[in-house]
Image (tube, rainbow, N blue to C red):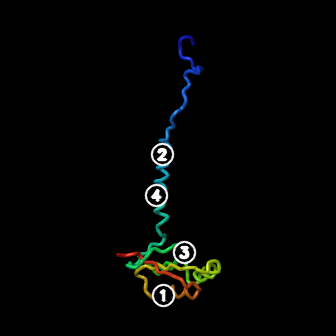
Amino acid sequence: MAGGASFGSDDDVQPIVGINVTPLVDITLVLLIIFMVTASYIVNPAIKVDLPKAASGTEQTKTTLAVTIAKDGAVYLNGERSSDAKIVDYIHGELPKNPDLQAIIAADKVVTHGDVIHIIDLVKRSGVHRFALNVEPGK
């Protein structure tokens, strides 16, 4: 290879001085979008309840005992359809582990007052003396 370019020559070797970060940024943005879309599904409750509004309502902390009364009168314990007996059994199992167990009771605004009082009474008779009624904060 006289007179031509020499492939084995040390004169032509140049160090890599830059890294192309475009693929890394693309992957990161795609993961961010996927996270944002899936986060909205995780945050939304599985049971759709139209909560009544209250001016004095505040955000409630996550608890191990969430009782929801749906529009059709079905009772859910921590997101799973339940009955009075299952709620009592759950409380008797959790109360020794967490004596400060608090119940958050959410009921659709068309649920009768008697149904809500029944759940409050059931929870209190089972040993949970701290409870809150979940409302949607209003103006």
Question: What distance separates the C-alpha of mark 2 from that of mark 1?
Answer: 54 Å
Q: Which residue is mark 2?
A: 25
Dot 1 or dot 3, earlier in sequence:
3
Vertical arrangement, residue 50 with respect to residue 116, above or below: above
Question: What distance separates the C-alpha of mark 4 from that of mark 1?
Answer: 39 Å
Q: Residue at x 47, y 50 (%)?
A: 30
Between 10 and 27, the one lying in front of the other is: 10
Question: What distance separates the C-alpha of mark 4 from that of mark 3?
Answer: 24 Å
Dot 4 or dot 1, earlier in sequence:
4
Between 101 and 1, the one lying in front of the other is: 101
Vertical arrangement, residue 51 with respect to residue 18, above or below: below
10 Å neighbourhood of mark 3: few (<14), some, or many (≥20)? few
Q: Residue at x 46, y 67 (%)?
A: 44
Identify the secondary structure beneath mark 2: helix
Find residue 63 and report its image quarter: bottom right
Q: Which residue is mark 1?
A: 117
Identify the secondary structure beneath mark 1: helix
Q: Which residue is mark 3?
A: 63
Q: Is residue 10 left or right of residue 53?
A: right
Q: Which residue is mark 4?
A: 36
Question: What distance separates the C-alpha of mark 1 from that of mark 3?
Answer: 20 Å
